Image (cartoon, grey):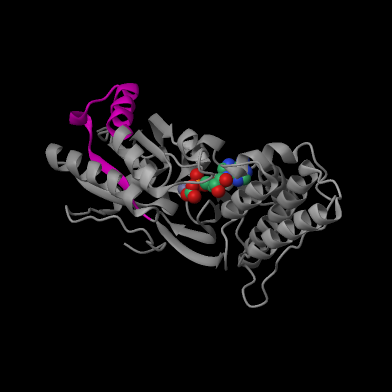
Amino acid sequence: MEEKDILILAIESSCDETAASVVKNGRCILSNVISSQIALHTLYGGVVPELASRKHIEKINQVIEAALLEAHVTLDDLDAVGVTYGPGLVGALLVGVAEAKAIAYAKKLPLVGVHHIEGHVSANYIEHPDLEPPFLCEIVSGGHTHLVIVKDYGEFEILGRTRDDAAGEAFDKVARAIGLGYPGGPKIDRLSREGNPSAIAFPRAHIEDGPYDFSFSGLKSAVLNYLNKCRMTGEPVVEADVAASFQQAVVDVLVDNAIRAAKDYGIERLAIAGGVASNQGLRTAMEEACKKEGIRFYRPSPVFCTDNAAMIGVAAYYEYRKGTRHGWDLNAVPNLRLGER
Ligand code: KG4
Ligand code: ZN
């Protein structure tokens, strides 16, 4: 007998994207609707939490309606509602959590709270039907930089993490210093293609007592010092060279740590995830390094790297299958740790 399809409505509102998606049987994305707040926050050079919450409230119903319409389903067809409940901005998270609870309660559906980072990792399952745990995953986003072994769906062993700034945060801060504006990552990515990655020797931090840990604050300071020195001596700043040399320094560390961990632990499959995983320089460098070492490389399409609800739907499906259910007391947890429930 054929098994019944499992349809999950997923909601994501942890930062500056209001997103909803309908996911069938875990890996089939029936719709993926994202309303970005970039235009709003650009005015301020970064995400303003209070404005983000208000915008989520304004958009969330439209985004959910669009996701249902695009998937050709109604609330009556759903089997569960999945929602990001942390980590993220508390006011932003609350909008998604309240909405998910309301829909689940009204339609008598199970509610599945999802860890945002588990969502990012799960983005890899969408386009790689053969990918199953265990594998190594490097998660590089605006708030997180983690190197983990995905032992099973939703089960992680953390090998390394950032000691200070997240990789995406470094991109955003350096972009601001060069004068590129928010959001910095994609702008540095684009500008780097016109620059020389070996023009300026920026530092690559390797941490003595944490071989898989990261640190980006020294690199960020080195870029700021370089820019100040140029301004003081009247030396012209070639922005594309600064961008390319900075990006190369980040990419080198991200590739080195991931490849070293894969070799040390004898893991033959490596995935990347999170907003920075859409960086072209990182994708190319990681692919080449993996090829050289005989490691299989997985990465989501750029649209599934940056925040979206499809990845939350995939993670929610595997949590649902394991029996994870949240009550009506589910709350937003802004500093939810990986592996915590
Ligand atoms: O995963 P994400 O959308 O949100 C978080 O969970 O934080 O990641 C956003 C981060 C931002 O810091 C953004 O600048 C960075 O990802 N980012 C990039 C690129 N696209 C987004 N960084 C480098 N290159 C890109 N192409
Ligand atoms: Zn994210």
Q: Nearer the viewer, residue 141 or 201?
A: 201
Q: Residue 224: x percent and y percent?
A: 71, 57
Does the magenta segment cover residue 19? no
> Most extreme residue toward the bottom, as rendered?
209
At 36% from the left and 58% from the top, the residue drawn is 334
Total numbered circles = 0
| 234 versus 76 height, above or below | below
Residue 246 location in percent, x, y? 73, 52
Residue that appears at 35% across and 64% down: 340
Pick whichever, 205 or 173, lies toward us.
Answer: 173
- Residue 122 visible? The answer is yes
Quick one: quadrant of the C terminus? Answer: bottom left
Front position in the image: 47 or 329: 47
Q: Seen in the image, is 27 located left or right of residue 190?
A: left
The quarter holding residue 1 reads top left
Vertical arrangement, residue 21 with respect to residue 210, above or below = above
Residue 287, position in %: x, y?
69, 45
Determine if the magenta segment contains residue 63: yes
Rendered image quadrant of residue 228: bottom right
Range shown magenta: 59-86
Q: Position of residue 156 (x, y in %)?
A: 45, 62
**Front position in the image: 17 or 111:** 17
Q: Residue at x 69, y 62 (%)?
A: 221
Look at the image and tell me whether residue 270 can be seen: no
